[in-house]
Amino acid sequence: MNKRDLPDTANRPDDRNIPIDKVGVKDIRYPIRLLDRANGEQRTVGSFNMYVNLPHSFKGAHMSRFVEVLNDHRGAISVDSLFEMLRAMRERLEAESAHVEVEFPYFIEKEAPVSKARGLMENRCRIVGSLQGERQDMVIYVTTPISTLCPCSKEISDYGAHNQRGVATIGFRFRGMVWIEEIVDIAEQSASSAVYSLLKREDEKFVTEQAYANPVFVEDVVRNIAQRLDAHPDIVWYGIEAENFESIHNHNAYASLEKDKRDPEAGDWQENII
Amino acid sequence: MNKRDLPDTANRPDDRNIPIDKVGVKDIRYPIRLLDRANGEQRTVGSFNMYVNLPHSFKGAHMSRFVEVLNDHRGAISVDSLFEMLRAMRERLEAESAHVEVEFPYFIEKEAPVSKARGLMENRCRIVGSLQGERQDMVIYVTTPISTLCPCSKEISDYGAHNQRGVATIGFRFRGMVWIEEIVDIAEQSASSAVYSLLKREDEKFVTEQAYANPVFVEDVVRNIAQRLDAHPDIVWYGIEAENFESIHNHNAYASLEKDKRDPEAGDWQENII
Amino acid sequence: MNKRDLPDTANRPDDRNIPIDKVGVKDIRYPIRLLDRANGEQRTVGSFNMYVNLPHSFKGAHMSRFVEVLNDHRGAISVDSLFEMLRAMRERLEAESAHVEVEFPYFIEKEAPVSKARGLMENRCRIVGSLQGERQDMVIYVTTPISTLCPCSKEISDYGAHNQRGVATIGFRFRGMVWIEEIVDIAEQSASSAVYSLLKREDEKFVTEQAYANPVFVEDVVRNIAQRLDAHPDIVWYGIEAENFESIHNHNAYASLEKDKRDPEAGDWQENII
Amino acid sequence: MNKRDLPDTANRPDDRNIPIDKVGVKDIRYPIRLLDRANGEQRTVGSFNMYVNLPHSFKGAHMSRFVEVLNDHRGAISVDSLFEMLRAMRERLEAESAHVEVEFPYFIEKEAPVSKARGLMENRCRIVGSLQGERQDMVIYVTTPISTLCPCSKEISDYGAHNQRGVATIGFRFRGMVWIEEIVDIAEQSASSAVYSLLKREDEKFVTEQAYANPVFVEDVVRNIAQRLDAHPDIVWYGIEAENFESIHNHNAYASLEKDKRDPEAGDWQENII
């Protein structure tokens, strides 16, 4: 029995008259390659969700076609290639809209502040892209580990101040080119100190004193980031989250804010679509 | 040195002129008690996120007050008590808006279909409530494990059909009273078969044959649920997700849709706010 | 067709001649009740793994019987009831050995050090029990969140010192009665400071200064705990792990050690079996 | 102030007289390269734990040296390079024993059984290596997703049979060269069917019928694997776990067994050390 003879259940009409917003495959991991400011290319592992819409008149989507599209793109991830993947999904699945999410660890070589010893730091990234009719959209999220020292604890205590690891997640829409490395810099500059994989004793002294000199609440982290993103000419929308793994509590402190820099009245919204 | 003498850093003015959408505590676990259709009360463990907005003129929120509010409510979780908690958060934190999320396992005693043997099944619930000015909102999410058998595999194969565990998550806004148990029933009726903690051999025969007689794609699960929620008089908005842990793949099949049954033109939106 | 007529596949002989160490059910959640030093009883949610051995001559275990045993015990968790559960598993499954693991959050009401404000703190516990012939064994693991301040950072820095949240996990075998609360106390006394769910400003000053006055490496935490467990008359074996979520790194610092206080030469091993 | 002037707190003597089994860094991620049977080399991302012992007379370990060793090896992971890394850890940290664990996703290109369509499948691997005096040891764990169809359900039901995704984890000690790909093959041959990332309709028919023709309990999976590992000339010890994500339950079925094929009486143990 060959393929042509097999009934195609998914292709049948459906009379429930209910369109489906998203249908597809979730949690599929694939090796990926992407641009890296320092080395030209970085190889890492992505976890993908790939969806299209399903009109009310179709019973099901052909799920294997998502994996074929993923395969065809062989793991090259860039702004352009993601939109190509979205167009291929829409075409192969005969849909009006397509949506892709990919999450991956991204490594940046960092120099310790005094010893200049070098080590790789992991950041987490997530890219969410979609096509709907003529409209295309992409948001890139970068999660940067940071160090925060509590201003209140410093001020009220005779010595010391509680501090902790935290994470800052910056989501942004953009025009032009924005490097992941720029976003990581913005997050680190907005904290009490950056974190590192490799610190020698002289570096540990430096980051300890730097953090003590720059106390920030989780609220300050999101505001400091917002100021820097406001000043960035290529970022047109942003959403910021900061979370502190409080060293004095078993729960976390959290702050978030979101801003659209585009002016819809001026037709600015349209222009800035990627 | 007593409390009055300690400087209050968080209370200071802030001149960056950036309001914060959400600030608060995240991932704090607390024992909770809630209404249970069968037994009157159920005790379980909730994981809370509690946030308020922070106007641009304040430097920080007083994080300990969130935990005080949580403590004062002593774990009684109901629609009314969550709105009370939100009002208390808004007042204690001097904010305009308040937001709370609580996630917990919820147990329902279930009878096996033939043997009538009884066992407890775990469902996951999440309640998201918010207050903003006069507007209050609540969405309840219920995640139900289900069994799905693939219609395509059944039709094209000479014998057998691949099937798997899946989960259906139903989020809903409501008027009146809707039991978690009703939502679980709707999810189970929309699948190939329910899943159970305890099945004897005669039950296993029953659910195997029931699933084979009721093949559904993940797309069918969300549509079947949508039809039932359309018919439910007390549900005014819903969002549905279904995910199959495919037995023939190492990734999942996914579908989702969302619908607002309220008519904003008719002022219906206002009426239906809880 | 009734149960008696259904073939019992699992009960068939197996000729591969391979005994199985553990067979059973994994990741089944159930509400549990256990003894609580402050309030008499605590209700929480346990996640169970339940296994027996399978002799080489049998094809399979009757999995539903594990859930029946769990059901019969209705969530009462104590040293005695866990051994009853193990005996019931062994009998119902016709096995020689039985093994149960249950993990759960355990809540302790804690007073802030200065304000005496009260809040609940979550600790994670895990109990591993087994029966093998005449030999019975039980290990209780308690994971306590702690705060640690780095001695090196304090010594080399002109001001401040990096500190962070960490966790200490203490596993122990015992004779007599040992409260979870005692183990939590030991972990907290071995750290730079305890952590709390609720701290007012005067408490924050206290714990900041307390941590600064008591710097500990992760190595010190496990050694301090070991000294206290050595002195505990009812603890006969222990395994200790400590992990710091370093505030200056994106990885954790870790230390572990294990000690058997029993003297096998003196037949001490036998005596101390619970 | 340069490095020489900074006090070295970790290097101080300790008088508690308590040796520590393992001290080091945990959960540090790094890009890695390893041998791949099909393509020569595979790039992926590893998560490392690196520990040494700490004699009772030292206060602490120099944690930054672990990261330096990791850096020096630049992510090349092989049996030889892991033992080099262990020797470097032992030397740099002045320890008697060293221990490393690395976990990573490993991708294998697989052909669908009928259409021959190709897609990448993710397996999870973990390598645990240690050096203690002259003794060196390595265990490789490979986790393979599989499909299992219940023999009992098939036998008692008039049509259909419940089946599900599962995972088989094979840990092994070896002499000579054993490919990850060989271990994956053994796991897949011991299940009802392999799982795939990409299956066309004709393949779905094939795997559905193949699984129906090869029903296995979780007990059968571990025994089938054990028989194949018994026959493998280069595997000298194994530990096997299988877990089914039951499609009719919300919990998993589990089986495990372990076997040492070496004969300690014959001095065989010594010989087989890698």
Image: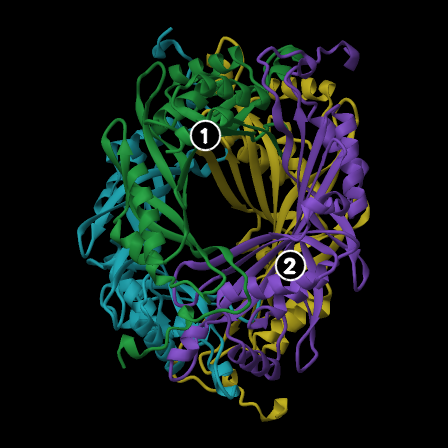
Chain colours: A green, B purple, C yellow, D cyan
Given the image, what chain letter belongs to the residue carrying mark 2?
Answer: B
Q: Is residue C48 above or below residue A263?
A: below
Location of residue C29 by image quarter: bottom right
- Picture coordinates of residue A269 (x, y %)? 45, 30
Give the amino acid type for the residue marked by disc 1 in the picture: Trp
Q: Could you tell whether D55 is left or right of C38 in the image?
A: left
Which residue lies at the image location 65% right of the left edge and 36% below the top edge?
C186
How far apart, in angstroms, are the residues tagged by discs 2 and 1?
42 Å
Give the amino acid type for the residue marked by disc 2 in the picture: Asn
**Residue A78 or C39: which is nearer the viewer?**
A78
Which residue lies at the image location 53% right of the left edge and 21% below the top edge?
A221
Location of residue D238 by image quarter: bottom left
Residue A269: mark in rendering: 1
Tell me the SS state at disc 2: strand
Q: Mark 2 sits on what residue?
A: B123
Location of residue B90 by image quarter: top right
Q: Is residue D61 above or below residue C161?
A: below
Tell me the SS state at disc 1: helix
Residue furthest top as drawn: D1
Label 1 environment density (alpha carbons within 10 Å; few <14, some 14–19, many ≥20) = some
